[in-house]
């Protein structure tokens, strides 16, 4: 199967690998995957008071397409507001990386990871607000 | 054909592996081509065909994942990739931690750590095997397993609700809900078993590499 150059580039030089402190107030963590086949993806965002994503990190165990999808996802959402990032569609990732049809689910995983990281952040923010009020 | 019927052993998940092997040997001996020398060719072919099916059935039943799948087929529980319930956050966390720990131990060439992880996963796998035994026992007709398996599944269901898909099931009355929920719990355990098998393979390969 022929993979696109962009995909191979992200796989060989993944951006933003690592982790952020999951207990920090300004960090949201998304953990998604299909563990039966061993795929698991963690995507974390650090969000400023203005709602802009200042930093994003990921750690993915899975195939090259899953790694490339999460690498690209972190690159794209940095500098975006959480509302903008929430709108990111898996099809945009799939298109950018020219994912073959059998690997589309990897981009779905990346989209789910972004959304669940944002939801985690919002939940934390709401809890903090509730405590302060 | 159902491998339990083929080997004529009572269907259960926690079957006696020694008895299974003994039955396999016995049937293989009875169907061995040497016994059919001089028999009409149709009969010989039939015996050979049965011998192949018996081998296949034995292979399916001796390995826990494929045995669970055979039982799912028997009881009409869909178990394919599409049927797999969304992983719970706790389970995803466990998988992530296991994979990170193994990768870290591999990087550090820490054989003792890999062996410890293997032991931990073996223990977790045993617990999963027990829960699967209870689930399949419940499916086999006895409603005895109102015990821990049912409680586990109710808890799992509660965690996962709000993910959307289970909500409609909740409207379908208590008994329908129980059916759906317990299949979901069973499939979750089966998913864990698959992952543990995978982890053991990877840990084994890592140990070979570090040796």
Image (cartoon, coloured by chain):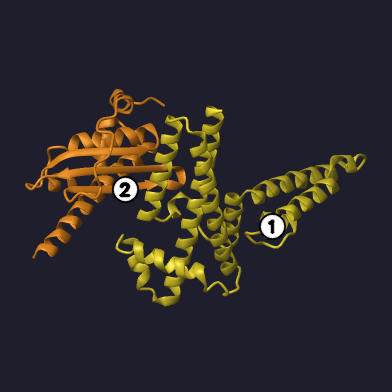
For residue B207, which quarter of the picture? top right
Q: Say above or below: A89 vs B160.
A: above
Which disc, if any, is residue A31? 2
- Whether residue A94 is visible here, answered yes or no, is no
Rendering coords of residue A33 (x, y %): 37, 46
- Please indicate whether residue A113 sits to the left or right of residue B187 in the image: left
Percent from the top left, x then y, of residue A16? Answer: 24, 33
Q: Residue B4 got which mark?
A: 1
Colour seen for chain A: orange
In-image side of A91 versus B180 (left or right)? left
Q: Residue B7 appears at what percent x and percent y? A: 74, 55
Task: Give me the residue at 50% from left, 69% from top.
Answer: B148
Q: Which mark is residue A9?
A: none
Q: Secondary structure at mark 1?
A: helix
Report the chain shown in yellow: B
Query: Residue drawn at (35%, 61%), measured in percent from left and top?
Result: B160
Q: Secondary structure at mark 2?
A: strand
């Amino acid at each position: 199967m022929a993979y696109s150059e962009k995909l191979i580039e992200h796989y060989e030089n993944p951006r933003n690998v690592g982790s952020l402190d999951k207990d920090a107030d300004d960090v949201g963590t998304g953990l998604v995957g299909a563990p039966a086949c061993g795929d698991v993806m963690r995507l974390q965002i650090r969000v400023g008071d203005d709602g802009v994503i200042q930093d994003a990190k990921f750690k993915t165990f899975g195939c090259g397409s899953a790694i490339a999808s999460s690498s690209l996802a972190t690159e794209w959402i940095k500098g975006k507001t959480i509302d903008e990032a929430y709108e990111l569609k898996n099809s945009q990732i799939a298109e950018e990386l020219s994912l073959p049809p059998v690997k589309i689910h990897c981009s779905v995983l990346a989209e789910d990871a972004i959304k669940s990281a944002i939801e985690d952040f919002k939940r934390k923010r709401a809890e903090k607000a509730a405590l302060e009020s | 054909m159902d491998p339990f019927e083929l080997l004529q052993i009572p269907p259960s998940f926690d079957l006696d592996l020694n008895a299974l092997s003994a039955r396999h040997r016995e049937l293989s001996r009875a169907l061995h081509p040497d016994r059919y020398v001089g028999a009409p060719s149709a009969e010989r072919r039939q015996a050979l065909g049965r011998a192949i099916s018996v081998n296949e059935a034995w292979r399916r039943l001796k390995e826990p994942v494929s045995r669970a799948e055979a039982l799912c087929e028997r009881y009409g529980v869909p178990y394919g990739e599409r049927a797999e319930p969304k992983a719970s956050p706790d389970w995803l966390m466990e998988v992530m931690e296991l994979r990170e720990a193994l990768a870290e131990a591999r990087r550090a060439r820490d054989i003792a750590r890999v062996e410890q992880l293997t032991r931990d996963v073996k223990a977790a796998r045993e617990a999963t095997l027990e829960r699967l035994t209870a689930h399949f026992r419940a499916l086999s007709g006895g409603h005895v397993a109102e015990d821990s398996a049912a409680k586990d599944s109710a808890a799992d269901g509660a965690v996962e609700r709000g993910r959307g898909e289970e909500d409609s099931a909740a409207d379908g009355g208590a008994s329908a809900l129980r059916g759906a929920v317990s299949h979901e719990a069973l499939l979750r355990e089966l998913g864990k078993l698959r992952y543990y098998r995978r982890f053991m393979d990877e840990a084994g390969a890592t140990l070979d590499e570090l040796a």
